[in-house]
Each structure stands twice: as C-alpha cells, then as structure tokens.
C-alpha cells in the first residue's frame, strides 16, 4: 500500500471514531439542553450529571426485542437503517479537518458530497415502505419529497460558494476563505444553506417525517431495538456532518476569522493542532444551534414546507448565484 | 486491481439490470436500477471520468430514482405476476454474491487472455470538471443551449398535462 | 467572439426560440390566449422571412461543426416554418371550437418548431438527437391535448411509449457509430466506410430510430392510432412539419455521413420503400375514418419520398425537397378542411359516411378539398404530381426501374381512396341536416391560400425546383460523393 493510502485510511478511521462518539454525546447534550430550555432537569441519574446516559440507552436498545412486521419486506426493513449511516460516513471522506488533514482530496469533492448526501434519503423512504404501515409509508413519502426539494436550494447555495473558490475541491474552497469567510461574502447563500441543511437532516422545524402528533413515529414507527438505534444514530451523525458542512462552506473551515491578515506563520504541527481546535469549536457551536432550533421553533405544515423550498428558496438561490457570478466576472475583468 | 474492479462492476451492472427486469416487485426493481446506476458510476470512475461518475450518482441515483420510488409508493403499484416464479429477495442476494465469485473467475480468465488494455494516463485530464466545462462551453455550446430548450419544453408539457383543467 | 457572428446564420432558429420563451412567459402572466396566438403568428412570419432570405444566403458549417446553415437546411427551415405557420393560423378557431384553446399549445408548438429547425441544421449526431427529442417531447404532449377523450389519451401514451423505445434505438446507434468513427460529426463519420459490426449495427439502429419518426413500414404501427386520436390540426402538424424536418435531417445525414456507402443503404431503402408504398396504399383503401385514411396515405407518401432518397443524387434529393414542400401544403390543407367539418358535430364526425353531400353545403371548402385530394393522389396539374414526378424521374435516371414501377402502380391504387372522398362529398345524399357554422375569415383565407399554392406550384414548379437543386450544390453535400 502506498503511503498516501495509509495516511488516508488513518485519517478516515480517526475521523470516523470521533464522529461516531460525538454523535453519542450529542444525543446526551440534546436531552440535557431540551431539559434546560423546557425548565426541567433532563436525564441526570446515570453517572455524574447523567453523562453515562448514552451508554445506558445503547444497552437498553441492544436488549430490546427486534421486531419485523409480518407482512413487511424483511430484507428492505433490515437494510434501510444502514443506508443513512453509510452515507453519513462516506461524507466524512472529503471534509478537510485541518491543513493537510483530509482523507481524500478529490477534484470533484463538492459534487461527491452532494451525491452522497442525496443517497441518504433511501434509508428513510425504504424504511417507511418496508414497514407495511400507513404511518411509516406517509413518513417515507414525506421524506422523499422533502429531501429532493431541499437538495436543489442546497446545491445552488453551495454552487455560489464554489464561484469564489473557482474549484470543486473542498480544500480549495476552505482555503479561498482564508481572508474572508463565505458567510460575509455570500450571506444569502448561507441562510439558504443552513435552512436546507436543517431540512436535509430531518430536524425540527422540518421533522415532518416523524411528526409524532400525526404519524406516531413516522418512518420508524415499526422499528425497535438496534435497528431503531441505527436510525437514531444516523440522525445525530447527520447533525454533526451538517454542522461540519456549514463550517466548511461558510465559516472558513479550519481558518480563524480573517486569519490571512493577522495570523503569523507557525510550525506544521502547531498549525494542525490550532486548525483542529478551531474546526471543532465551530462545529460544536452549530451542533448547539441545531439543538437550540429544534426546541424553539414549531413545525412547518407540509404544503408550506414544499412551497417554501420551490417558490422561495430556489428562486432566491438562483438570483443570488447569478448576481454573485456577474459580480465576480465584472471584478475579475475590470478591477484586477 | 483495476481490471478486477471493472469486471466486478460490469458483472454487477448486468446482474442488477437482469434482476430489475425479472423481479416482480416494482420497488425492488427500482432499487436494482439504483444498484445498476451505481455500478455504472463505478465503471466511469475506473475510466477516470470522475465528474461523470459523481453526476451519475447525484442525478440518476440520488434524484431521479428517488422520484421514481416516490411515485411507485404513492400509487401503491401492485406487484406484477412473476416472470419467473419464486424469485425472492434472498435468492437475489445470493445471486449477487454469486456475481462476485463469477467476476473473480472472469478476472482470472481475462488476465490470462490479457483482454483489457489499461486506461491511458492522460484520461485523468479529460474527465475533470474543468475539461468538461471547457468543452461544453465551446464545442458543445449549441447542443447545450438546445438542451435547455428541451428541458423547458418538457417542463411546460408536464405541467400542462398534469394541471390544466379544461372547462 | 467567433460563435456570436455565426449566430447571424441562424436567425430563424433564434427568432423561434425567443418567440417560444416569450409566449411561455406571457402565457404564465396573462389570461388572454388570443394574444399568444398573434404573438406566435408574428414570430413565425418573422422566422419564415428570415429563413427565406437564408435560402439565397451563403452556406457552411458553424458552431465547431455542430450545425450547417444555408442550402438544404434553409430550405428545410422554410418548409417546416410554412407548415407550422399554417397550422398555427388554423389552430385558433379549431381549438376554440373543441374547447381546448389553452396558451401552452402555442409555446409547445414553438418549442417543437425549435426542435425541427435544429433537426434541419444538424451536422452532428448530438445535435441531431437533441433536435429529434425536443420535437418529440413537445409532440407527445400535444398529441394528448384532449386528455378526457380515451382515444386521445391512448394516442398520446402509445406515441410516448413507442417513441421512447425508438429513441433508445436512436441513441444506441449513435453510441455505436461513435465507437466506430471516434467522433459524432457527420463529416468525420463519412471518412469511415467499413468499421465492422459496430459500424453497421450503429447505422442500422440509427436508421430504425429515424424510420420510426417518419413512420416507414415496418415501424409505422403507431401512426394510424396516434393520427386518429390526436387533435386534427396537431395531426396535420405531426404529418407535415415533423416528417419534413426528420426527412431533411435524413437527407443531410445520408448526404454528409454515408455518401460512400450509398449502394449499401440504398438496397435497404428500396425494400422499405416498396413495403411502405404497398402497405400504406392498400390499407388506406379500406379505411372509413378520414383521419385514419390520411394516416395511411401519409405512410404511403413516405414510401414515395424514399424512392427519391434511394436515387441518392442531387436530382433525387431536390425532388424529395420539392415533394416535402408540396406534401406540407396539401396535407395541412386537407387536415384543415377535415378539422373544419369535424367542428360541426364534435369529434366523431371524421367518419367518411358523414361527409355525404358536404361539398354543396360549403362550396369553397368542397373545392379546396378536391384540390388537395387530387394533389395528394398525384394528378396533374397539382403540386403533388410534380413532386412525385421529380422523385420517380431521379430514380429512373439512376436505373431503379422496378422500384419506380411499384411506385407508379401503388399511386394508381391510391387514386381510388382519394377520389372516394370526393364521391362522398358530391355524389351522396346528406344523412342529416346539419346547420353549418361559418368559418372565420383567417381560416377561410388560409385554406384558400393553401389551395392556390397547391395549384400554382403544380403549374409553375420551375423556379422553386431550381432553387432546391442549387441548394444542394451550395451546401456541397454532393462534393463528398463526387457525383
């Protein structure tokens, strides 16, 4: 095996380990924060301040009976929960965590990312279909419609960032933000992207897929045991990955604000350590934002959800893209 | 390695296509089509056409097939009468595992016969986004614009068929 | 910018493209459908004028060899735009009468015309494919315009499914030819004359796709059902403009990409031409439904046109162009009259039994119908005769005597069913007393103009056919063949 391959594998495995564990911690954080926002204690019994709660949850799920609906599609029912986890893991491959720390530095990183995340919808949809239950099916259908609708504004918002970097390579996109973060250069794109990212993660206020008041549990009504646990894990992995993407595309990735102007040259190791810290802090902030929004905002109606994407976000995104493209072209032709 | 992967993807693509046609459940058929598209994307990747491979997954597997599934589920299409009886999902999976073994055998046979030439190194330059963009906006500018009209016409037509209420 | 100056050679295409988008946007924000009608007519007349001036302009390749302009392409554009213009002129009254006068029809017809204009300029298999698809997709929708009607829905579905299947063949053929020649450009393909199985397979599949679109036997199965189910004027559009566009594209394809293997494909074309002529004419004999009869007659006409293609000379190709021109005029006219009769009693008035005595009730339409029928039958002195004569003459000159003999015999058979219409119109008693609605001014004038053109170009074919012949020399299609 070539040295690059070994480095790639090491980075990928470390990143995977970190993301999986972060997902578990985020579950706990969400429940504590929910408690805080709703003026109640939240889980505080297992371990000091309840820190061992995720472990207890996993143990409970492992010992739960694993039920497959008799008239459902057994094979699809089993495969479905794995798909969103796979896509989440696959997305990690192209995210740069620090200078030079990226598992795979490919030419079409952005498209790869969009392609991989777009595959995630199969898990939820098939889970809903295979359960042979109306609630699940409705949840699955909603998810298919929602994901496809919000992929477009998301893609357009990312495309407007690509314009600044003039590349589809993730590392180059991050490095193009060394002086100015994209959130300053492309605020409308940021708003569109963050909304679409919430919708893609199926989180409130876009959690129509599992709206418990209408659909019992939505697509996972018929799931139990570790299969349910896998879906649950995938949701939080998507929260973490979504935050990473927001940071990468709009908050300079591992760069400090305006770092190009004031940050002195440092040794390689120091740079990597600093980068990792910066990246983690920013990611954690957005994870917090995800949780905060979930427990603050009410859910959309389904028709509003679709309308919002197709007749608000998408036109706005396209206009934003055209304006930025023209501005960059004029700037490059006449002012530089 | 590349040859083996090619044969693996190629057999997988053919097997998935066959399974798609022979399967009696429409949802399963759609899923096999997804598998087929993913295998084709793999073959593109081996030819160093990265852009094409990713777009294949993004557009076909990620968007169009989701809409297919959506419509199939929404209309609740009944399972068809079986073309071949007693093909169930487990059987299909064992067939796919068989494909892997078969492709390995084919690989051995193929490497004996030296059947597949290696992909030229400069192909990596042809398959990049930049190269494709240059071509699209110079040589293929006319087809590109016509495609835009084609898609507009299709959208107008689809909306008219679906929505127009005649008094 | 090189490509911007090249745009000047594509004015008709640009005008129609802009027109289609303008009509679409106006339709989205305005309730007034009549406005769209005037806009479409305006854009089509402008495009027609531009395209006529292109006939006398220079010819050459443009857009990195993706398209050709001038010569054959410009003349093809004239035929397509002429057909479209008259269909749109007649459309408004007809659609209002059958209560389907919606704005999208105009934008779809214009989109379709864009596809046709791309087809007649295609110099690359990619452009050719996109032209065919743009045209077909708009036509699928237009065919299913009356979706409440079961026959209409069936027609649209059948057309769509079989059309998609044919597209598969077409694309596969393109892929194989690309594999054989290493390029999709027609001139580059001409350099390969025998690329083995890939080459011949690709050529065969490509031709299957095209034969489907022009409904040559044995790929004609969809034609009668679709022609019967679709709204009559849309049928006229499908039978004339879309066929003309595909055949012009076929001429360019054969003349530029496969000139050196003429003897090979001519054999295939002979067989198909014979089959098409015999089958189209014989089955048309027993049709009682007017639209089905015209559908089979259009199949038969494709057979005659293929006789001209078999000849493969400048005379043959220009004969085909003349035939297309004459066919477009007279067929739009015939369908226009059918659409007018149909209006009186709803959609099932197309049965020939109902035509008893109609000739006396509306003398003008009766006379016009007679002219169109005589012309379709190929009786002098109408345009249809000249077209047929030129096509057959070219084939005889190249020594395809047997083929032409079949053509002549089948044309004689064809006279029977065309004259049969006139027998009904003039020699049968009317079955019931229908009060006739008066046609609008535009409708009357359009039919009249078409009838006059049918006569005029039958008596004075010289100038037009000279232009058609010159067009080929200009485009230098024949230069490659050395004929």
Image (cartoon, rainbow, N blue to C red):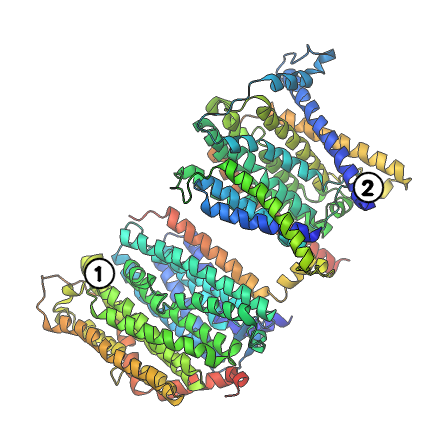
Few, some or many residues within 10 Å of mark 2 (<14, 14–19, 20+): many
Residue occupying image coordinates x 26% and y 75%: C448
Residue occupying image coordinates x 81% and y 43%: A100
Few, some or many residues within 10 Å of mark 1 (<14, 14–19, 20+): many
Report how many numbered discs are placed on residues in the image: 2
- State which quarter of the image contains the N terminus of chain C: bottom right
Residue C167 location (% of width, % of height): 45, 61
| Residue C333 visible at all | no
Residue C254 location (% of width, % of height): 48, 76
Instruction: Give the side of residue B45 with respect to residue C180, left or right.
Output: right
Residue C63 location (% of width, % of height): 59, 71
| Disc 1 chain ID | C
| Residue C106 location, quadrant | bottom left
Q: Judge whether B127 appears above or below A63 on screen.
A: below
Residue C202 location (% of width, % of height): 51, 67
- Front-most of residues C392 and A34: C392
Circles 2 and 1 on the same chain: no
| Residue C335 location, quadrant | bottom left
Q: Judge whether C450 appears above or below A157 on screen.
A: below
Q: Give the number of the disc on residue A99.
A: 2
Q: Which residue is mark 1?
A: C343
Q: Are marks 2 and 1 in contact (CB under 8 Å)?
A: no
- Front-most of residues B9 and C4: B9
Q: Judge whether C328 appears above or below A184 on screen.
A: below
SS class of the residue under badge 1? Answer: helix
């Amino acid at each position: 095996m070539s040295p690059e391959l070994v480095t790639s594998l090491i980075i990928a495995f470390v990143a995977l380990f970190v993301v999986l564990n972060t997902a578990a911690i985020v579950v706990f954080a969400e429940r504590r924060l929910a408690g805080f926002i709703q003026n109640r204690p939240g889980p505080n019994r297992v371990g000091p301040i309840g820190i061992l709660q995720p472990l207890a949850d996993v143990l409970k799920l492992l010992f739960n009976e694993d039920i497959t609906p008799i008239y459902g599609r057994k094979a699809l029912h089993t495969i479905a929960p794995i798909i969103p986890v796979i896509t989440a893991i696959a997305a990690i491959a192209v995210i740069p965590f620090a200078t030079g720390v990226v598992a795979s530095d490919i030419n079409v990183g952005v498209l790869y990312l969009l392609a991989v995340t777009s595959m995630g919808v199969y898990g939820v949809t098939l889970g809903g279909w295979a359960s042979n239950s109306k609630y699940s099916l409705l949840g699955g259908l909603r998810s298919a419609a929602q994901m496809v609708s919000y992929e477009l504004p998301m893609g357009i918002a990312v495309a407007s960032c690509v314009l600044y970097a003039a590349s589809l390579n993730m590392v180059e996109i991050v490095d193009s933000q060394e002086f100015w973060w994209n959130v300053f250069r492309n605020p409308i794109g940021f708003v569109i992207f963050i909304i679409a990212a919430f919708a893609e993660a199926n989180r409130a206020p876009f959690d129509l897929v599992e709206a418990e008041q209408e659909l019992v549990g939505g697509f996972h009504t018929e799931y139990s045991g570790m299969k349910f646990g896998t879906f649950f894990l995938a949701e939080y992995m998507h929260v973490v990955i979504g935050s990473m993407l927001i940071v990468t595309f709009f908050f300079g990735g591992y760069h400090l604000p305006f770092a190009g102007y004031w940050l002195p040259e440092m040794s390689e190791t120091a740079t990597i350590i600093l980068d990792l810290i910066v990246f983690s802090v920013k990611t954690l902030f957005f994870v917090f934002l995800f949780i905060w929004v979930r427990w603050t905002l009410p859910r959309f109606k389904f028709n509003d959800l679709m309308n919002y994407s197709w007749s608000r976000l998408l036109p706005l995104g396209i206009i934003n893209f055209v304006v930025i493209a023209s501005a960059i072209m004029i700037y490059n032709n006449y002012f530089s | 390695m590349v040859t083996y992967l090619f044969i693996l993807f190629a057999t997988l693509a053919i097997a998935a296509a066959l399974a798609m046609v022979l399967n009696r459940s429409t949802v399963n058929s759609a899923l096999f089509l997804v598998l087929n598209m993913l295998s084709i994307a793999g073959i593109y990747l081996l030819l160093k056409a990265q852009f094409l491979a990713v777009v294949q997954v993004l557009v076909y597997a990620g968007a169009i097939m989701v809409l297919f599934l959506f419509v199939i589920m929404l209309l609740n299409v009944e399972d068809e009468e079986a073309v071949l009886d007693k093909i169930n999902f487990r059987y299909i999976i064992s067939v796919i595992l068989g494909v892997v073994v078969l492709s390995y055998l084919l690989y051995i046979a193929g490497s004996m016969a030296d059947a597949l030439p290696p992909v030229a190194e400069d192909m990596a330059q042809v398959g990049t986004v930049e190269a494709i963009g240059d071509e699209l906006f110079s040589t293929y500018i006319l087809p590109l614009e016509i495609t835009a009209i084609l898609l507009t016409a299709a959208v107008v037509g689809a909306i008219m068929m679906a929505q127009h209420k005649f008094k | 910018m090189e490509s911007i100056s090249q745009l000047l050679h594509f004015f008709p295409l640009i005008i129609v493209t802009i027109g289609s988008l303008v009509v679409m946007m106006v339709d989205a924000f305005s309730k007034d459908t009549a406005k769209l009608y005037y806009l479409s007519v305006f854009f089509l007349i402008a495009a027609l004028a531009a395209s006529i001036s292109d006939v006398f302009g220079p010819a050459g390749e443009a857009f990195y060899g993706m398209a050709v302009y001038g010569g054959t392409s410009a003349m093809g554009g004239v035929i397509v735009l002429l057909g479209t213009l008259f269909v749109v002129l007649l459309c408004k009254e007809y659609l209002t009468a059958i209560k389907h006068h919606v704005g999208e029809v105009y934008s779809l017809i214009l989109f379709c015309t864009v596809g046709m204009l791309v087809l007649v300029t295609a110099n690359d298999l990619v452009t050719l494919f996109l032209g065919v698809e743009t045209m077909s997709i708009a036509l699928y929708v237009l065919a299913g315009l009356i979706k409440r009607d079961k026959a209409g829905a069936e027609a649209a579905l059948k057309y769509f499914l079989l059309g998609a299947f044919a597209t598969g063949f077409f694309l596969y053929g393109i892929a194989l030819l690309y594999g054989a020649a290493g390029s999709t450009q027609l001139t580059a393909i001409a350099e390969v004359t025998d690329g083995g199985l890939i080459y011949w397979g690709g050529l065969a599949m490509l031709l299957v796709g095209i034969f489907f679109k022009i409904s040559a036997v044995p790929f004609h199965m969809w034609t009668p059902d679709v022609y019967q189910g679709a709204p009559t004027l849309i049928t006229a559009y499908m039978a004339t403009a879309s066929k003309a566009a595909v055949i012009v594209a076929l001429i360019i394809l054969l003349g530029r990409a496969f000139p050196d293997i003429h003897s090979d494909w001519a054999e295939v074309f002979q067989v198909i031409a014979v089959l098409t002529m015999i089958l189209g004419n014989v089955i048309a004999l027993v049709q009682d439904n007017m639209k089905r009869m015209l559908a089979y007659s259009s199949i038969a006409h494709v057979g005659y046109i293929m006789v001209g293609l078999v000849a493969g000379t400048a005379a043959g190709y220009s004969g085909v162009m003349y035939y297309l021109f004459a066919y477009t005029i007279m067929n739009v006219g015939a369908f226009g009259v059918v659409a007018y009769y149909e209006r009186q009693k709803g959609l099932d008035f197309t049965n020939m039994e109902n035509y008893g005595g109609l000739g006396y009730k509306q003398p003008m339409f009766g006379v016009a119908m007679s002219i169109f029928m005589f012309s379709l039958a190929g009786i002098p002195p109408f345009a249809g005769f000249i077209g047929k004569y030129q096509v057959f003459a070219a084939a005889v000159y190249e020594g395809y005597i047997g083929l032409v003999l079949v053509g002549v015999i089948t044309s004689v058979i064809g006279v029977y069913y065309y004259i049969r219409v006139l027998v009904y119109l003039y020699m049968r008693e009317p079955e019931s007393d229908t009060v006739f609605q008066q046609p609008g001014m535009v409708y009357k004038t359009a039919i009249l103009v078409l009838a006059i053109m049918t006569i005029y170009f039958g008596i004075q074919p010289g100038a037009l056919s000279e232009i058609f012949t010159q067009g080929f020399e200009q485009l230098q299609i024949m230069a490659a063949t050395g004929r």
